Image (tube, rainbow, N blue to C red):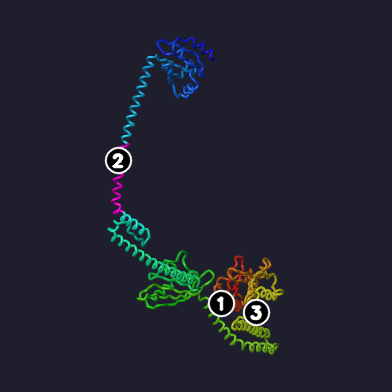
């Protein structure tokens, strides 16, 4: 490749009118052609060094200057393209001796001129630095003298400013002391400041004591308020407090449960937006009565209908007055008197039953004996013997029915006081159900689901036995009321189960059947005397059950089952 390039370059003619020497190098730094017209160039020319080639290729330097034997040699190298080949062209020029000397002198003069110029700037800088140092020294001396002279006047002011800052940050009682002879001019000012600081400290101490007393009083008041709120939330009496405009301020949990209230927050609302139905009507009637009659209090009874039955409530409205005699609002107290009313009615019914049993029981036996005697004496002697037999038998049957009714009345009237002793309810149930093992009607099953963790309770075993018998007999009658055909397709079932609820501290006994259930017409009065679903029932069985359970401090309730039938639940407290 290099030989071919050389052959092509031989055809080139030397450049005319150019006083410099020219060399041509390949891309690999190989000398391809050279025109050395000047004789001195043939003596001093050398191929560029490795370092020069590196500078050429990195384009850091194109011109090179070198001084050889009092001659200055210039070398200019640059890349060129010839016949699509990358090459380097060198122009080499060696200056004559006189020109080289002149150039050297010019360079020397330039160096001297630059040195003198730089020396002049340096001298000027030295003078400027000295001047600045002298100026700073003078300023420093003047400042020091001024500070020394003014320190006696400024220091007390600074001390007072610092003391004021510390007092403002809470360091009450901080005192400023005289530190120099000039401070005496500020003695009165410092004395006044120290007196003010001491007074602030004393006032702060007194204020802290007052604040602590107020906080303690506030905590005591909050404790009392929480106690009152806790009492109001846990008492069985409903309480509703209102301001002078009729807005509710306090409404405890019992009142919310006792009354039919609209949903949502009650506190702060007007009573007309909270009370509904009869509770609202009765309350407005009591308010109107107090306003018109100028009385301090009034009481009314109302009946609140709930899902689990009606609730009889006694409402007492009290007018609150301040020490000046001005109205301060009202308080309405609600008491659930359902159980009291029930007990009063039961007591009244028991008195009625006692009198009925006393008045009817005595003539029943003579009537029955007379009917039997007439039947025996005139049987076969009258023309219409059948009518005589039927009439006397009717009298006897009705007397027997009256005797059973009088017996029920008598039992209801003389329900004995409970004599509770520690007993096992499960064992009482088992002993009672022995009566039904061989006496259950066809296709009626009686099963038990008794809890193994049932604690013993103070129970009157004989009275609880009557309760179980009453409930089981009612279940049998309810199932038989559906008819024999119904039991063929679906067997009658009676289940007695007991459970223990430790978190509620109660035990429950359930008697469940798949009979006809309780019709809605009598569900609200089921436990009242003479309320019955039996054709010939007295309506005292469930009343006796409810009274007996109540004597044991328990509750009796029932619910109709969605699948048919009814479930009676007895809840007894664990003591």
For label 3, count other residues whose C-alpha is less than 10 Å away and answer few (under 14), some (14-19) or many (20+). Answer: few
Query: Which residue is depicted at the point 61% across and 71% down?
Result: 508
Q: Nearer the viewer, residue 505 or 218?
A: 218
Q: Relative to 4, is 280 above or below?
A: below
Q: Measure the C-alpha gap from mark 2 to mark 1.
A: 119 Å
Residue range (magenta): 129-154
Q: Which residue is mark 1?
A: 528
Say which label, 3 or 1, has the lower sequence index.
Answer: 3
Depth-wise, is mark 2 or mark 1 nearer the camera?
A: 2
Depth-wise, is mark 2 or mark 3 nearer the camera?
A: 2
Query: Which residue is depicted at the point 62% across and 79% down?
Result: 420
**Secondary structure under badge 1?**
loop
> In the image, residue 119 lies at what x, y percent?
34, 29
Q: Relative to 16, is 537 above or below?
A: below
Q: Measure the C-alpha gap from mark 3 to mark 1.
A: 22 Å
Query: Which residue is depicted at the point 45% across and 19% down?
Result: 78
Does residue 259 appear in this view? no
Does residue 393 appear in this view? yes
> In the image, residue 520 lies at what x, y percent?
56, 70
Q: Which residue is mark 2?
A: 135
Q: Which residue is mark 3?
A: 462
Depth-wise, is mark 3 or mark 1 nearer the camera?
A: 3
Q: Nearer the viewer, residue 489 or 474?
A: 474
In the image, is 236 to the left or to the right of 567?
A: left
Q: Relative to 58, is 368 above or below?
A: below
Q: Measure the C-alpha gap from mark 2 to mark 3.
A: 123 Å
**Secondary structure under badge 2?**
helix
């Amino acid at each position: 490749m290099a030989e071919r390039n050389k052959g092509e370059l031989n055809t080139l003619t030397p450049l005319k009118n150019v006083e410099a020497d020219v060399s041509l190098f390949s891309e690999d730094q190989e000398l391809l052609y050279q025109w050395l017209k000047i004789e001195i160039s043939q003596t001093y020319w050398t191929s560029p060094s490795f370092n020069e080639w590196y500078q050429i290729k990195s384009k850091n330097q194109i011109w090179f200057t070198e001084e050889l034997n009092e001659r200055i040699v210039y070398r200019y190298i640059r890349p060129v393209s010839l016949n699509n080949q990358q090459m380097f062209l060198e122009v080499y020029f060696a200056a004559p001796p006189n020109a080289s000397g002149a150039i050297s002198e010019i360079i020397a003069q330039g160096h001297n001129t630059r040195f003198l110029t730089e020396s002049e700037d340096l001298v000027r800088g030295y003078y400027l630095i000295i001047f600045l140092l002298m100026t700073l020294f003078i300023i420093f001396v003047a400042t020091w003298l001024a500070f020394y002279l003014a320190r006696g006047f400024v220091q007390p002011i600074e001390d007072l400013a610092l003391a004021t800052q510390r007092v403002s940050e809470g360091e009450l009682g901080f005192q400023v002391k005289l530190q120099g002879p000039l401070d005496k001019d500020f003695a009165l000012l410092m004395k006044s400041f120290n007196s003010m600081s001491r007074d602030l400290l004393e006032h702060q101490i007194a204020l802290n004591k007052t604040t602590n007393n107020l906080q303690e009083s506030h905590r005591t008041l909050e404790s009392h308020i929480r106690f009152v709120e806790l009492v109001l939330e846990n008492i069985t009496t409903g309480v509703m407090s209102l301001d002078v405009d009729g807005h509710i301020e306090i409404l405890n949990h019992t009142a919310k449960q006792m009354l039919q209230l609209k949903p949502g927050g009650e506190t702060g609302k007007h009573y007309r937006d909270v009370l509904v139905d009869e509770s609202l009507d009765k309350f407005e009637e009591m308010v109107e009565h107090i306003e018109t009659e100028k009385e301090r209090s009034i009481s009314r009874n109302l009946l609140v209908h709930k899902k689990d039955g009606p609730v009889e409530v006694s409402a007492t409205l009290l007018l609150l007055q301040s020490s000046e005699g001005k109205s301060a609002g009202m308080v309405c107290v609600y008491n659930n008197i359902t159980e009291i009313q029930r007990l009063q009615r039961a007591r009244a019914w028991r008195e009625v039953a006692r009198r009925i049993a006393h008045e009817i029981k005595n003539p029943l036996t003579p009537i029955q004996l007379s009917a039997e005697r007439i039947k025996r004496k005139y049987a076969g002697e009258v023309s219409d013997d059948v009518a005589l037999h039927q009439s006397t038998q009717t009298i006897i049957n009705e007397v027997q029915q009256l005797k059973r009714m009088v017996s029920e009345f008598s039992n209801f009237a003389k329900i004995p006081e409970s004599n509770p002793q520690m007993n096992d309810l499960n064992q009482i149930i088992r002993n009672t159900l022995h009566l039904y093992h061989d006496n259950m009607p066809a296709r009626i099953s009686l099963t038990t689901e008794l809890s193994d963790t049932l604690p013993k309770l103070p129970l009157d075993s004989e009275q609880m036995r009557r309760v179980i018998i009453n409930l089981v007999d009612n279940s049998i009658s309810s199932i038989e009321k559906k008819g024999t055909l119904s039991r063929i397709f679906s067997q009658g079932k009676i289940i007695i189960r007991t459970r223990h609820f430790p978190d509620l501290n109660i035990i429950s006994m359930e008697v469940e059947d798949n009979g006809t259930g309780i019709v809605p017409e009598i569900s609200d009065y089921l436990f009242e005397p003479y309320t019955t679903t039996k054709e010939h029932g007295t309506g005292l069985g469930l009343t006796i059950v409810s009274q007996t359970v109540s004597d044991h401090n328990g509750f009796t309730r029932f619910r109709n089952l969605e699948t048919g039938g009814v479930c009676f639940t007895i809840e007894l407290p664990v003591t």
